[in-house]
Each structure stands twice: as C-alpha cells, then as structure tokens.
Image: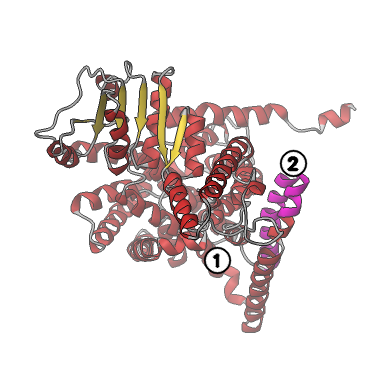
Amino acid sequence: MAAEVAHGPDLGALVILLGSAVIAVPIFKRIGFGSVLGYLAAGLVIGPFGFRVFTEPAEILHVAELGVVMFLFIIGLEMQPSRLWGMRKEIFGLGLAQVLTCILLLSWVGVALGYSPQTSLIAGTGFVLTSTAIVMQMLQERGDLAKPKGQKMVSILLFEDLAIVPLLALVAFLAPGAGEVTMAERLTGVAIGLGAILALVIAGRYLLNPIFRILAAARAREVMTAAALLVVLGAAWGMQLGGLSTAMGAFLAGVLLSESSYRHELEADVEPFRGILLGLFFLAVGMSLDLNGVVANWQLIAISVVAFTLLKAAGVYAVARLFKASHREATERTVLMTQGGEFAFVLYAAALAVGLISDEGSAMLTAIIIVSMLLTPLFVLIHDRLMPEVEVDASGVETPKDATGSALLIGFGRFGQIVSQPLLARGYSVTTIDNDPEMIRVAASFGFKVYFGDGQRLDILHAAGAHHASLILVCIDDRAAATRIVQLVRHEFPNTLLLARAYDREHGMELVKAGVDYPVRETFESAIKFARAALDRLGEPEAAIDDAIEELRRRDEERFALQLTGGMLAGRELMIGNGGSEKPKDVAGPDTAPDESSVGG
C-alpha cells in the first residue's frame, strides 16, 4: 500500500497547477488582459523559470494538446455549411484577403532579422492569427458583437480558425525530413490521407446520427458524454493513423455533426473538457517560455514586436478600406486585431515538434506573441482617447427624468409601437425610451412622447421610473442587448413584472433563465394567425380551428417547459411531424436555416 501511495499522483503539484490558474485568470480578466494571458503568466510563475514546481513542461504540453483538438471540434460544430454559406462573402472574401495580405507582409520579417526562410514563414504566419479570445471579449464589452462592424471581425476570426488546419499541414510539409520523401511515398501518403478523410465523412454521414439517436433513447447522460469524447478522440486518432493532423480530424468531425440535432448537447458535453485542457495547454506554453533566452535576445524581440505589429496593422487597415469600411471602422478593426493569438502557440508547438524551429526560437516567438497581446489593451485605450465614439445627434429630443409611468416600454420600433396601443387605450401611463433619435423625432410627429435613452444603463432606467413601474416591457430587436437589459432589470428591480420580446425559442429560454416573467416570441402569434387563416380558407369549421389552435398552444407551452430543464431536444414527441409514424428527423426548422433552436418557433 505504501509503495502504491508513493507512486501515486502528485496531488500537491496538481493543486498548485489548478490553484495558479484559479488565482491568475480572474486577476488578468479583471485588469483587462484576458484569460489567455492569465494562464500564460501562471505557467511562467510555476514553471522551470519561476518557482520550478514543474520542470518538464513538455510532458504537460503533450497531454494538454488534447485541449486544442477539442477546441477545433467545437469550432467545427459552429461551422454549419448553411451558416458558412450565409457569411461566405465576409468569411471567404474579407477573411481570406486579410490573412493572405498579412502573410505576404509578415513572412519576410524573419529573414530580415536573420531567421531561415522556413522559420520566417512560420513566425509571420503565426502572428497573422489574431487572438479570438481577446477580440471576442473586447467586442462583447464594447457592445459591438451584434453590430455589422463586429460581425465582420467575427467573420475574419472564423476564417482564421479554419485556416489553422491547412497551416498545420504546411508545418508538416516544411518539416526537415519532408524533402527526403520520394514521390511514390508522397503519393501513397496523400492517398492514405484522402482515404482517412473519406472514411470519416462516410462514418459521420451515415453512422453518427443513428448512434446518438440510440444513445439518447437510452437516457444515460454519462454515456452521451463518453460518446462525445469518443467521436472527438476517435476522429483525431483516425486522421493521425492516416498521416494527417489530429486537429484536422477533430475539426472534420465537428463539421459533420454541425447540423445534427445533437449539436448543442455534444458541445455542452465536450466544452468542460475543452476548457480545462486548453487552459492546461496555455499553462504549459507559459512554463515553456525560456526567460534566459528572452533576456538574452530582448532587443531582437522588441524589434520583432514593432515590425510584426506595424506591418499587420498596415495589412488589416488596407484590407478594411479595400472592402469599403470607413476610416473610423478600419482604424478600430486595426487596433483590435494587430496582436498575435493563441493559435500561434499551437502552430509554434507543432513546428517545434517536427524540428522546424529550435527551443530558443520557439521561446522567442512565443514571447513576441505574448508581448503583442499585452499591448492590445493599451492600443485600445489610446484609440478610444484619440478617436472617441461619435456622439449621437440627440438635439431636439428629451432624456427621461423622474418619470412615473405605470409601465416602462423599452424600444419603440414596430413591435413596441403595436404593444403600446392597447395599454394606452386602457388608460395606462406608459413611459417609453429608445436610443434612436431619428425614430423619436418621427414618433413625435405622430403624437408619441418617446424619451432618448439606452435601456442597458441603470441610470437611464431609474430616470425612466423603472423603480416605480408596475410593468417593464423589453421590446428591442437586439437579442444580446435584450438579454443584458433583462439581467439588469431583474437584479435591480426584482419585484417588478417583466415581459420581453424573444427572437426564438432558444432566446426565450435564455430570457426565462435571466428572470423574465413572460417571453413573447416575435413570430409565434403571427404564425398562429397565419395558420388560422389557412385552415379557414380550406373550409374548416370554426370550432375545429379553435381546437387545433388551442392544442398547438398547449403542446408548445408543455414543450417549452420541458426544454427549460431538458435542453432543446426535450419534448420532440410533442411536435406533429409529416414523416408518417417516424419521430421527427434531424432537419431544419420551419423558420430559419437548419438550427434546432428555432424548430417550433
């Protein structure tokens, strides 16, 4: 027993590993540097160049690379062919143009600094890959994620996420031993690789959905989790056996399952493992940072950071202007996207593993990326000081002050205008706010009093009388903003009755969990009236129509309640399909592109 204990896991080291991340990540996120830099800093402190709690980071890195594999699986799940097709111009036009332009600008920098051409190409390409974590966090904090300028940046990030797969293949091609392979061996390798891809596509097309359907029917949650991990790791292993990247296998598996009705469940099952292992990967990268090499070459690192940053900034700005972005939008995109990103660490680790770069070179390139990431918040701060947001022309419109209406209506678009009519007809005093001055001016010409204000600001809510109102109605058409308003209202005014407009079922569930008393799905009632009209034109009796509509409402309410606790797939049997005796298949919903979040409205 003593021997077994002596050779058991080093729990003390494990506690330090997890504890360092738990301490560092929240601190770095709070000061605006993001979780990735927190992991890197924690790894540096406990690694061989810090307190030496861990002296062999390569062993941890080897295990933690599974986090990258799972990360690419999650990315694949988000890459539904329908979604990619809908965003094709931004992703494959804007994204491709920015990546190629920046590669052309950056790949020669290393040669000028004394690197070999292969190392220079890898170094420059790694810096092209922007930090998804940093940019997405800043877009969310700035409220730009759902705006057109934010969606364009998201499209570029999506393309860069896609690009990591061929870039990893490029690393394998440039490996020192790759040139010694004969043409016959290379063709054989290509054939084996294509065969592995074809086998994965066939398995994904014809086996995965039936298998998950059987497992779902068994109602064994832990088996579904095990199956999700089996798909990810099995696909990665299959690609590895075929001589290809494990990351490519995981990515393809994700794409194949991206339009499955089990997509959300798979993502939920894999996400915790992905998060832990990817955090472990960044910890290991931080441990691997050779501070002695960094100190010895600090001048070269500083010059490299300046050169890479300036050239990438020039490339991002030029492409933005080429694609008709305004000077302000192009400048903001440049500031947010000039840093290197977390996928550069993946690329450099792969290059190190095949001998394309040395340990010292990997440490220097990693240091360059980290410094560029650290500089991003500073660049954003300078940008916001020099180019503040253009003030909205609110001349001639009033802001709320000590309003006392019995109802507060937030958002006076088409939806909000209709909602206001019965309330006003019944004599209720309604305070209305909106953040579009032009719409407020037009509303005034029709006899409406609408105040200028953003419902996401607590001071505006107080000024609009939210603390006095018996009812608050959130009628805006911005899904993310609506959720934020609901969360703010429920936290600050917990006893006020709260209704909100929901985009679809999934958004409705999100709003209920945020505290809404009653979500109204924006297309549901109009679809019911449409169906009633259809039955009436077909000659159905009025009583039969009433019964059908009432049954629809009952089934919808029951299914919605089941989904709140059991996920999007719960209550599928309550839907009436047209596939005979079979249960509803994994097809698109009636409202939108294939996405089960909208099936049933």
**Residue with the mark numbered 1:** 169
* Residue type at the position of mark 2: Glu
Q: Is residue 314 left or right of residue 57?
A: left
Q: Is residue 212 left or right of residue 324?
A: right
Q: Position of residue 89 (x, y in %)?
A: 36, 65
Mark 2: secondary structure = helix
Q: Position of residue 149 (x, y in %)?
A: 30, 50
62 part of magenta stretch: no
Mark 1: secondary structure = helix
Name the residue furthest bottom: 184
- Compared to residue 289, the image places residue 468 above or below, namely above
Number of residues whose C-alpha sits closer than 10 Å to that of mark 1, classed few (under 14), some (14–19) or many (20 or more): some
Mark-to-mark CA distance, 2 and 1 = 34 Å
Boundaries of the magenta span: 213-242
* Residue type at the position of mark 1: Ala
Return the residue nearer the eye: 57 or 325: 325
Q: Position of residue 414 (x, y in %)?
A: 29, 43
